Amino acid sequence: MFFSNYRKYSDAQLRPSLLWEFDLTQFDWYAMKNMVVQRVIERGRITDFYAALNLYGMKSFKEAVKNIPYLNKKDINFVCTVFGIKKEDLKCYTHRQFHPKHWNS
């Protein structure tokens, strides 16, 4: 797995610019876990992934990925490939299947 060595990077920090609209001094990292993981997937650098994995752990990170309400197709393929998750286990993928777009939009 690509991020299997994340514990080597225990000093990695999330960039505050990922969560620019929040006051990080009073931020509840565990209540907002799904949103943090979504931001890391969509806009994060490799050090942001290491920081999030050190904060939440691999198992908890994968569970948060499964509960994210929206990811684009590229990000869905990325998390499925890198973390070994089936597309059918993702909330964003099953939601997309239940709500197909019209062919002209």
Image (cartoon, rainbow, N blue to C red):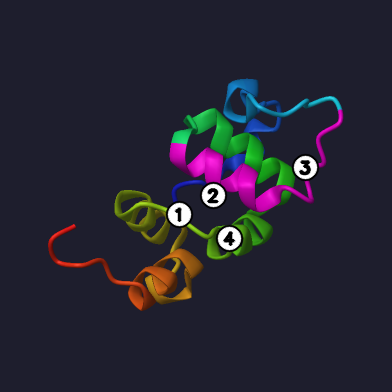
Please state, as top left, top right, bottom left or bottom right, where the C terminus lies in the image: bottom left
Label 2 and label 4: CA atoms lie apart by: 13 Å
Residue at image x 26%, y 66%? Answer: 101
For the residues labelled 2 and 4, say whether their Cβ atoms are less than 8 Å apart.
no
Q: Which residue is mark 4?
A: 62
Span highlighted in magenta in the image: 26-42
Q: Secondary structure at mark 2?
A: loop
Q: Which residue is mark 2?
A: 4
The one nearer the camera, 56 or 34, is 34
For the residues labelled 2 and 1, say whether their Cβ atoms are less than 8 Å apart.
yes
Determine crowd level at label 2: few under 14, some 14-19, many 20+ residues with C-alpha closer than 10 A.
few
Q: Which residue is mark 3?
A: 29
Determine crowd level at label 1: few under 14, some 14-19, many 20+ residues with C-alpha closer than 10 A.
few
Instruction: Give amino acid for label 2.
Output: Ser
Q: Earlier in the sequence, mark 1 or mark 3?
A: 1
Label 2 and label 1: CA atoms lie apart by: 5 Å
* Residue 95 highlighted magenta (yes or no): no
Residue at image x 30%, y 50%? Answer: 74
Q: Position of residue 98 (x, y in %)?
A: 37, 78
The answer to whether one can see residue 5 in this image is yes
For the residues labelled 1 and 3, say whether their Cβ atoms are less than 8 Å apart.
no
